[in-house]
Image (cartoon, rainbow, N blue to C red):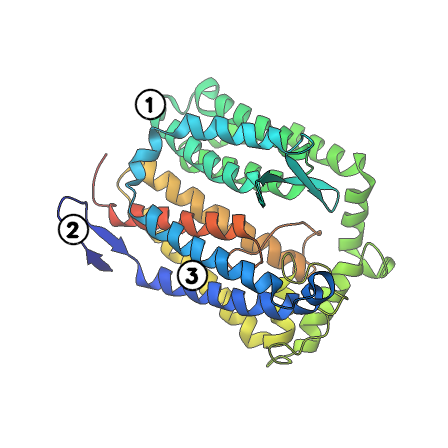
Amino acid sequence: MIKSSARGLAPQTYDPGMLFAVFILVGIGVIMVYSASSAVALKKFSSDLFFLKKQTIFCFLGILALVIFSHIPYRIYRVFTYPLLFVSFGLLVAVQFDGAGMTAGGSARWLRLGPASFQPSEVARLALIIFLAYSLTKKQEAVKIFSIGFVPHAIVLLVFSVLLMLQPDFGSTVIFAALTWLMMFVGGVPLRHLLAPLAPVIAIFAYLVISKPYRFERLMAFLNPWNDPTDKGYQIIHAMMAFGTGGVWGAGIGKGSQKLFYLPEPHTDFIFAVIGEELGLWGVLLVIGLYSTILWRGIRIANTCTDTFGMLMATGITFALALQVSINMGVCLGMLPTKGLALPFLSYGGTSLVLNMASIGILMNIGARHDQRA
């Protein structure tokens, strides 16, 4: 650990291992966003640098967010728990209104803010983590009571889920549900309470899949993409082809072919497949190793934190990151049904990058104060 202090300020700690992994991933992301998007940008915007310029700006904003949030004492978020929660609800509602929300790919997931846009679900995920950490900490004495430890948190999750499904954003709904379940488990909610709603949840999940033909078709395509190689299985097949042609050493940066209007969204949802093709197995293993370093440091911070609120926040941030990485990689490798989720620190997109780097800042601040009791 590298410690620094200033007069009148609490000591700050920057985890060099975590910082190194994050910055290397961000650097790889900038390079690969340009490689994956240059052809698309040239065709759509007459400039191959269009997405690169924007991603570079996002990177600077992300670094600024990381530095700022690493210096804000994490306990202060307890005061803003409910304002953040209700603002998140409001933002998710706002995307449904014409003139405010933006629709892309059949989903209204973006909110206009002047000339810019952002995804409220990214803000909502962090707000959910803070709420669960605060609520479970406050209710420690009674967390084993079903009506206190389980029901209020399940209601908040239900509200978020309804708002997300209106977009629709099935992938984020799954992440929010898994995140809530894990944080309640770590926070001391009895396993029997967590398993009690399993049957109706499975029934609702099955209904959501079957009720929308495209979700059911995606599931079938995931099980056997070659049944419909030109439509529902198209993305998975071309992603797997990218990994296959990359081999051990890769085709070389900028020399991949699947990004040339074969692989949909090569600079966002499927950037991992472009990495597999251009950097090969060694590039894939490098990326996995960097993510593993971040997750290991996050778990260590959670395990060593002496404050329940800090421990739960660290757990939530680390697990949320792990879920995003696992789902995105699983989709690209044909191991999971297609979901529109960004790969943290690598995919093009300002909201994801800035919020994830802000979360890393919070995580490092928790690690800096793990020996201070609330």
Under tag 2, what secondary structure? loop
Q: Position of residue 205 (x, y in %)?
A: 69, 35
Lower sequence index among marks 2 and 3: 2
| Mark 2 and mark 1 residues within 8 Å of each other at the beta carbon | no
Q: Quadrant of residue 253?
A: bottom right
Q: What residue would you read off at disc 3?
A: 22
Under tag 1, what secondary structure? helix
State how many labels appear: 3
Mark 2–mark 3 Cα distance, whole angstroms, equals 25 Å
Q: What residue would you read off at disc 1?
A: 141
Q: Residue at x 80, y 34 (%)?
A: 211
Q: Residue at x 72, y 74 (%)?
A: 257
Q: Is residue 346 visible?
A: no
Q: Quadrant of the N terminus?
A: bottom left
Mark 2–mark 1 Cα distance, whole angstroms, equals 37 Å
Q: What residue would you read off at disc 2?
A: 6
Mark 2 crowdedness (10 Å alpha carbons): few <14, some 14-19, many ≥20: few
Callout 3 amino acid: Val
Under tag 3, what secondary structure? helix
Disc 2 versus disc 3: nearer the observer: 2
Callout 2 amino acid: Ala
- Going by the image, does 10 lie left or right of 335? left
Lower sequence index among marks 1 and 3: 3
